[in-house]
Image (cartoon, rainbow, N blue to C red):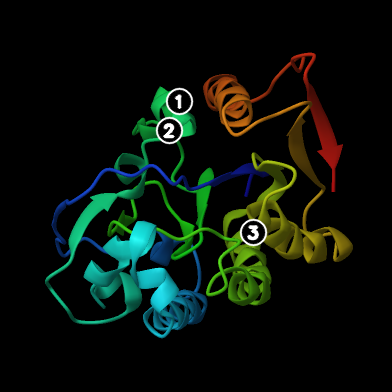
Amino acid sequence: MPEKKLFLIPCCASKKPNGHSRSAVPDPVSRLISEATYSGILETRREVLSGIRQDKRYLSGKYEKNRRLEPGPDFGGRSASGLYLPAVKRYKGTLYSNVPALSSRSNRDDQILILSALYGPLHTLSRIQDYNLQMSDKPAYRIWKKRLPGFLRNYALSNGIREVHLFFGSSTYYLKAAQAAVGPLLKEKLIKKAVQYHVIGGSTRLTPQTHSELLEDFLKRGSIDRLPGNVEARAL
């Protein structure tokens, strides 16, 4: 099996609302990992959803849309009332709107994973509901930090991943959760390297813009000859 690169990217707060009834198409992530590992992901999603429902803070104000979350197949449930969009269409922030290659059918299915505070690891075509939750929120980080390492280990071994490239802001909980999952792979020498792209002087606007340009180059050419002057490649 050829050695492969995996690109980890964050979800975003800006999302398209509504969606369509979920079809019978299975979650693409489910065929890239073992059945037991995917079952663990569904269990973790249910745990996060339960945490949301038990805390009124995550059901009102800017979190009001979470009241409409249905325990459908995306959580291992049976509800057919949820409205869905593929993740790459649900998220509409800078990183998604500026990287046409993200939604290209020519990209390898196992090349990109999105890290969501609610759903954890997502394929770009994983069908998800509209929601609002950040990795720094109480129901998310503690749980995903614990569960992601096992998932990523199985994912890397199942798909020949030997390099992991992280496009997360340096001060975000998304990076912290990803580091907790990638670190053991490096320690066990299951991957050769892991790199996080730090945007010097980055902001909530500059960082995703810069990351989108880097990611587009990676997806089109497979590598980057020279990084921009405001980007540091930090080895984990």
Give the spatial CA distance, label 1 vs label 2.
6 Å
Q: Position of residue 26 (x, y in %)?
A: 27, 64
Residue 27 visible? no
Find numbered disc 1 in the image and state the secondary structure of the residue it sits on.
loop
Q: Quadrant of residue 97?
A: top left
Disc on the earlier residue, 2 or 3 = 2
Q: Nearer the viewer, residue 210 or 3?
A: 210
Residue under the point 50% across and 80% down: 40
Residue under the point 49% across and 82% down: 36
Disc on the earlier residue, 3 or 1 = 1
Give the spatial CA distance, label 3 vs label 1.
24 Å
Q: Position of residue 1 (x, y in %)?
A: 62, 50
Residue bearing the label numbered 1? 99
Of circles 2 and 3, the one toward us is 2
Residue 63 visible? yes
Q: Do the numbered discs 1 and 2 sit on residues whose CB atoms are within 8 Å? A: yes
Find numbered disc 2 in the image and state the secondary structure of the residue it sits on.
helix
Residue bearing the label numbered 2? 96
| In the depicted structure, whether residue 44 falls above or below residue 178 | below
The type of residue carrying mark 3 is Ala
Q: Position of residue 93 (x, y in %)?
A: 42, 34
> For the residue carrying disc 2, how many other residues have a C-alpha within 10 Å: few (<14), some (14-19), or many (20+)?
many
Q: Quadrant of residue 168?
A: top right
Residue under the point 52% across and 58% down: 134
Please give left or right for residue 77 compared with residue 124 in the image.
left
Residue bearing the label numbered 3? 156
Find numbered disc 3 in the image and state the secondary structure of the residue it sits on.
helix
Please give left or right for residue 88 compared with residue 233 in the image.
left
Q: Nearer the viewer, residue 118 or 178?
A: 118
